[in-house]
Image: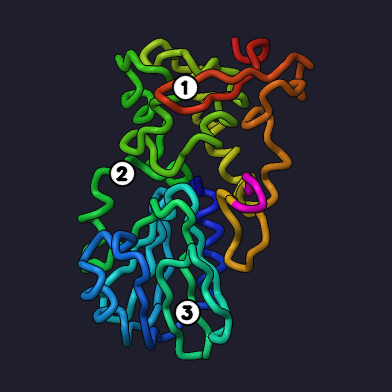
Amino acid sequence: MPELPEVETYVRELEPILYGRTVTGVRVRWARTIAEPDATTFAERMIGQRFTSFKRRGKYMLLGLESGDTLIVHLRMTGHLFIQDANVEPDKHTHVIFDLDDNRRLHYQDSRKFGRMWLVADPEQVLHKLGPEPLSEQFGIQDFADRLRKRNVSIKTLLLDQTIVAGIGNIYADEALFAARLHPRRTGGNLTLPEIECLHTAIRTILQNAILLNGSSLGTSKVQNYLRPSGEPGGFQDQHNVYQRTGQLCLQCGELIERIVLGQRSTHFCATCQK
């Protein structure tokens, strides 16, 4: 699933391509991709819109339009956005096509059809429940500790809770917990303040490094969790210490990486480094 580093890469790489471009036509081939408004109204309102700003909130892309509306995109598990020439035929997994005024198209492709789009005047009606951005000043250590305090839930599950901190998913939760040397089964309320400080630093460091390497691309040739707008993969998957390395040797201690399920999510860790 594209997480904060992958979505940040999308926003940064789409901006020089889409800035100032006007949408001249829209085709919605899978109506449920459009969460708000209905698909027909969405297509009608998008025509003539000009892209003017590019931001991210958690795992959501916020593509600002000259009218004041915002196109919000959440890629979920297998969503991708690609720029294609107008003569490139969309494949069967392409569910929304935006015609642009430079004879190119923006394709939204999603093999599992979980991704969603919103066209709204106020993004907060979609984003209001999100917690702080982990790379912002609002993500303070004391506030983070307060959000974890008295929570009798595994720290891995809490890191996936978007109301506690926005943008972290399975990949970066596992990697941050490894970097902080915390076992994923530890409960939030059981962590000491020094441990929370260490985790806070690990989260920020891991996310910053992943952004520098344009995110993590994982999966098979048929189903990729993420590819950049150019179709190229990210590079941070080569830096993973534990995520999807079950049965491989820990790069720090040499013991085998283990996998368990917490909150119905695969969780990868080293039992020696993360006691």
Which of these two is toward me, 143 or 119? 119
What whole-number distance in Å separates the C-alpha atoms at marks 1 and 3?
40 Å
Which of these two is toward me, 52 or 184? 184
| Disc 1 target residue | 196
Disc number lying in front (1 or 3): 3
Figure label count: 3
What whole-number distance in Å separates the C-alpha atoms at marks 3 and 2?
27 Å
* Circle 2 Cα neighbour tier, 10 Å, few/some/many (<14 / 14–19 / ≥20): some
Which of these two is toward me, 16 or 33? 33
> Is there a contact, CB below 8 Å, between mark 2 and mark 1?
no
Across and down, in percent, residue 194 comes to: 50, 17
- Side of 248 relative to 234 (left or right): right
The residue at the point 63 percent across, 64 percent down is: 231
What whole-number distance in Å separates the C-alpha atoms at marks 2 and 1?
20 Å
The residue at the point 68 percent across, 28 percent down is: 245
Residue 233 is drawn in which quadrant? Answer: bottom right
Residue 175 is drawn in which quadrant? Answer: top right
What amino acid is labelled 2 in the image? Answer: Leu
Residue 89 part of the magenta segment: no
| Disc 2 target residue | 130
Is 94 above or below relative to 88? Answer: above
Is 40 above or below relative to 204? Answer: below
Across and down, in percent, residue 40 comes to: 23, 75
What amino acid is labelled 3 in the image? Answer: Tyr
* Circle 3 Cα neighbour tier, 10 Å, few/some/many (<14 / 14–19 / ≥20): some
Is 106 above or below relative to 2? Answer: below
Per the rendered image, the range of residues in magenta is 217-222
What amino acid is labelled 1 in the image? Answer: Ile
Is 237 above or below relative to 48? Answer: above
Across and down, in percent, residue 45 comes to: 25, 79
| Disc 3 target residue | 19
Judging from the image, what secondary structure is the residue with disc 2 in? loop
